[in-house]
Image (cartoon, coloured by chain):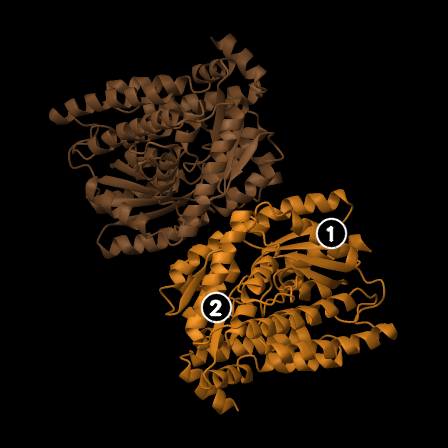
Chain colours: A orange, B brown
Amino acid sequence: MTENCRAMWTDLGLDLEGHTALLDVLGKAYQDIYLSQKDRPEAMDYFDFVMSEIHGLRIMELLDEKKAGRKIIGSYCVFVPEEIVLAANATLVGLCSGADFATEEVEKLLPRNTCALIKSSFGFKLGKVCPYLESADMIVGENTCDGKKKAYESLNHLVKNLYVMDLPQVKSEQGRALLKTEYDRFKAAAEHLTGVTITAESLKQAIRTVNAKRNAIHRLSSLRKADPAPISGLDALLANQVFFYDNPARFTKSVNKICDELEKRIADKKGVFPENTPRILVSGCPQAVPNWKLPFIVETSGAVIVGEESCVGERGTRNLTDESGETIKEMMDAIVDRYLQVNCAIFTPNPERLDHIQEMVADCKADGVIHYSLQFCQPYLMESIPVEKALEEKNIPCLRIETDYSMEDAGQLKTRVEAFVEQLR
Amino acid sequence: MTENCRAMWTDLGLDLEGHTALLDVLGKAYQDIYLSQKDRPEAMDYFDFVMSEIHGLRIMELLDEKKAGRKIIGSYCVFVPEEIVLAANATLVGLCSGADFATEEVEKLLPRNTCALIKSSFGFKLGKVCPYLESADMIVGENTCDGKKKAYESLNHLVKNLYVMDLPQVKSEQGRALLKTEYDRFKAAAEHLTGVTITAESLKQAIRTVNAKRNAIHRLSSLRKADPAPISGLDALLANQVFFYDNPARFTKSVNKICDELEKRIADKKGVFPENTPRILVSGCPQAVPNWKLPFIVETSGAVIVGEESCVGERGTRNLTDESGETIKEMMDAIVDRYLQVNCAIFTPNPERLDHIQEMVADCKADGVIHYSLQFCQPYLMESIPVEKALEEKNIPCLRIETDYSMEDAGQLKTRVEAFVEQLR
């Protein structure tokens, strides 16, 4: 298998040496952070397998799909509607942006004061270590934050197949109209790429497939309400991360299998941490694979994470697309309505995000909130101050953290997190 | 007069102590930076007077206008169309954002990693030292960069009369439609504020008034092409800064008076610096009063600044609004078309800005470009890298500077600027 993989990675133009180094680091991190956890649900072995093959078997699958004429579309954001991609008989995958790579090269193209996620996406391209990116027939950028918006202008010189989607900044009538126009344009682009005309049937099926993924994740979220927590925040985050990579139907089935097991655990009052362990909601920037830094620190500091108000988490998955439409127009409208509800900090104002954080605190029975911002991520950094203020006014403890992908501040973060957890007891 | 001013400032709710401290610093800076220059055009005495009365007589004028029933609209951005404001019988003024003030208080509301311009706007409010802000009947924010967009959400808690204008991120058909909708909405808001219905006549007159201001500035820019330079970059920047504060007709007349004098100087081969002094184009972030840091360093380092590709400069003033429309609809369309041409880095992509920089280098006969970015200003920092690359490919030397409003890095900047100037000789 390793030989096959090597040949595949070579064909994709990866830098084998750099890629091996990356996989080694990733494997060791997974071992230290994930496999060292105690009392994990057995069904998590599926995700262990997925992670061990994330640049192996899954890429082979995608390449097999390509050989069979299917197209692969890569994305960096939850605003790219998987419903449209699937309906056009293409596969949507998230693109790597969760680890530092080739930083010196990256900083020739991007200012040093750029968030780690954007730098990472460039690093994986410049270092030639992301097989998803190299497999993709179309890479979709989107005008979310200033950093990404401007970075795509430079990325456009590094890749041949970048498609940029404009997005509104306000949830107004005009904002909705812009999103509608852009999703219609994306639908046409996906159809053009695949040569497949989206039909009412294919769109309806795609909506159902994506909603099923979301429903499985909702079920998982709901089970995390139990005390003792039946699953760690690390493992639940992993499920949310794999959401962006896996085959949708298989993902749905696997998450539901975990949920079956968690239900038994809850009935047996069995948890991964003792009852009354301080419960934390993490809110803020997305945590892309393999960015497990914060949950690892939190869950080795005497607390359990019970929810993620994040793009890689409930912000990205909470809303379903209405399935009742019969025509393409009705379903496209439903898709627009669904995505316009995402409470990304790029929107101004964005009061629904604060409402959602408070709802999640209540639903997950969280004792406190850690607001997680990537350094230089202006939208979430800006929102973190009013979020903290509003939560503290409601006597919900809040710790604001600003960090990046390096481990340099891990000790300092751990000290702060431990002090925060102590306060929640 | 001082007694009158004190009473006026008290009535406006200013903090007299802080305000006196600010004016003292401003007065000393003006003395050291402006009045120490040699061979200045005599007609600059008008701007010296304006600056000495920028918080005095000019505020009295505005308050007199208010007493006569006119409304004052304050703005932080060149996307707020003065044509509409004037046509509604209101006065547009730029709001203070060029100096650090009350930084400790500001950083309770905004992340430390926020650009100096945004922090300054909060500092002037929190410190109660901006008489323009306190005189304004409406304060207009605009969704340009992430920093400003999110900061207005917090500013909305500090002021009673904030109006936020949405802006497009792409110069597409949808982008234009959004701008049109927003300008129509702003027209209605201005009419509502003033109780004055904009007519074809008033709008036409307003377009002419604003174009006349721009034409005067164009004339000034054009005279700066001469070698020896007939006016310093500092003085020309000041004219561009006062553009945002002064009575439009008086401003136009005053700039044209300077231009008359400069024409004589050019005929006499008289300059503020010797012939063949290295000539620099400054490109990038706006330099608001009293942010004279960079031009002061440059022009005391053996070079002269011959143009500003900036919002406070040619980016803001270069385009005229077409005057040929006869109906309100035609003129509103012309206004939309005019402002959509502004090459702000919030647009993606923004290739016209690079074209404009190169045109300006040729027009101003610049020997090199200094790209000026405020620290944490992602849009201009992001663009600075491809701008530098493109210029260097055309053998145009470029120095990228990233700074803020403090003087802490002045020594280091001076060393870098001197080395750059040496390279241009």
Number of numbered discs overlaid on the protein picture: 2
Residue A301 visible from this viewpoint:
no
Circle 2 crowding by C-alpha within 10 Å: few under 14, some 14–19, many from 20: many
Q: Is residue B401 above or below residue A373?
A: above
Residue identifier under label 1:
A358
Q: Which mark is residue B126?
A: none
Which is in the foreground here, disc 1 or disc 2? 1
Q: Which mark is residue A101?
A: 2
Name the spot of residue A396 as percent of width and height, x first: 76, 49
| Disc 1/disc 2 C-alpha distance (Å) | 36 Å
Name the spot of residue A332 as percent of width and height, x first: 55, 63
Location of residue A13 by image quarter: bottom left
Name the spot of residue B348 as percent of width and height, x first: 40, 53
Lower sequence index among marks 1 and 2: 2
The residue lying toward the viewer, choosing from B186 and A379, is B186
Q: Chain of mark 2?
A: A
Q: Chain of mark 1?
A: A
Image quarter hosting the C terminus of chain B: top left
Q: Is residue A262 above or below residue B305?
A: below
Q: Is residue B249 above or below residue A32?
A: above
